[in-house]
Image (cartoon, rainbow, N blue to C red):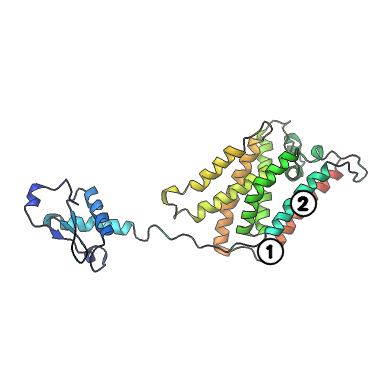
């Protein structure tokens, strides 16, 4: 490979070989790949060079008057690119909790069927579950905090339920494998609650919504943040791909249908991403929660859900 920038006076002199040990201390001959790479570096800096093979390996030749400049450029290049690209993050063993996660999803479907029955509780007959638990903006801002939680367990119809279970179930199962079911469900629930709260604050007073999709998009945000942090170096210039993919999913699934609450989806995703960043930072320092803490987190989620519905019913 011969640079077009070679000057005629330099062509009249015998070009000299660059010794690799003078660049990075590595003895021996250059490989073909490295010789051509170094030649490209020098050509980018307008330094004439030639990469030539012999029976032992490859040589990189430069004019005598450019030896020191070539060495300096190659040293800078090797220093800046040392240990790059970094190795991929270590693979953590997944937690085996598919059965418990699926059981929760089945309970969500079972509860949906119960809300369609004529049910008597605490002397109230019949109960209008949607009216009791929907995320109505004015009532939430008036202090009915339980609606932030109860709305996540309600669905407008079977199609609404099945779409959340089919799409959200995949992400939730994967997240529970990554973090452990207790921590995963805690973050999912928290992102759904805060997503509903901010959505209520920015919507009109009469706005109301139901569905687990706020929490589902919180799950997507958590996974995007985990991937972003873990692969921020390994992806090099493509480090935003995980977030871009999650936003594409939000655009694809979060705006479908005339009754879709885009605000709830968006805020659920944003809070999920924030929780994911914090969670990955803490996991890097302390690892996944142990068995006892994981169980306590899972129990806390159950208590919060039951308490919210209990308050909703007794407040009727």
> Could you tell me which residue is drawn at 49 percent across and 60 percent down?
89
The first of marks 1 and 2 along the sequence is 2
Task: Identify the residue under disc 2.
Answer: 107
| Residue 124 drawn above or below residue 55 | above
Within the image, what quadrant is residue 252 found in? top right
Taking the image as shown, residue 242 lies to the left or right of residue 314, namely left
Q: Secondary structure at mark 1?
A: helix
Query: How many dots with numbers?
Result: 2
Q: Which mark is residue 293?
A: 1
- From the image, state whether disc 1 or disc 2 is nearer to you: 2
Q: Secondary structure at mark 2?
A: helix
Q: Residue at x 71, y 62 (%)?
A: 295
Measuring 68% from the left and 63% from the top, which residue is drawn there? 293
Front-most of residues 55 and 250:
55
Q: Say if 249 sits above or below 56 in the image.
A: above
Q: Residue 202, how many percent across, how many down?
A: 65, 34
Residue depicted at 8% across the width and 57% down the height: 14
Judge whether 210 appears above or below 294 on screen: above
Residue 150, percent from left and from top: 76, 44
Towards the viewer: 175 or 162: 162
Q: Position of residue 151 (x, y in %)?
A: 74, 42
């Amino acid at each position: 490979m011969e640079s077009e920038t070679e000057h005629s006076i330099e062509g009249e002199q015998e070009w000299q070989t660059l010794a690799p040990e003078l660049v990075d201390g590595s003895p021996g001959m250059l490989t073909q790949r490295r010789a051509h790479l170094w030649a490209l570096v020098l050509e980018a800096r307008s330094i004439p060079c030639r990469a030539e093979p012999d029976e032992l390996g490859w040589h990189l030749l430069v004019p005598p008057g450019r030896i020191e400049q070539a060495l300096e450029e190659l040293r800078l290049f090797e220093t800046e690119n040392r240990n790059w690209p970094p190795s991929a993050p270590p693979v953590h063993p997944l937690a085996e909790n598919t059965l418990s996660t699926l059981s929760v999803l089945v309970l969500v479907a079972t509860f949906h069927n119960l809300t369609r029955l004529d049910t008597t509780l605490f002397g109230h007959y019949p109960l209008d579950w949607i009216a009791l638990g929907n995320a109505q903006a004015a009532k939430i801002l008036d202090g009915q905090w339980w609606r932030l939680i109860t709305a996540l367990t309600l669905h407008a119809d079977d199609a609404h339920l099945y779409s959340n279970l089919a799409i959200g179930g995949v992400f939730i199962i994967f997240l529970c494998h990554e973090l452990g079911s207790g921590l995963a469900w805690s973050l999912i629930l928290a992102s759904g609650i805060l997503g509903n709260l901010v959505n209520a604050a920015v919507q009109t007073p009469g706005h109301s919504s139901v569905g687990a999709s706020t929490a589902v998009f919180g799950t997507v945000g958590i996974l995007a943040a985990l991937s972003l942090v873990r692969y921020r170096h390994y992806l090099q210039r493509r480090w935003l791909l995980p977030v871009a993919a999650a936003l594409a999913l939000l655009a694809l699934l979060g705006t479908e249908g005339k009754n879709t609450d885009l605000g709830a989806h968006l805020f659920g995703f944003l809070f999920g991403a924030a929780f994911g960043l914090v969670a990955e930072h803490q996991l890097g320092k302390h690892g996944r929660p142990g068995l006892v803490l994981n169980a306590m987190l899972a129990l806390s989620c159950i208590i919060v859900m039951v308490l919210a519905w209990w308050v909703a019913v007794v407040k009727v």
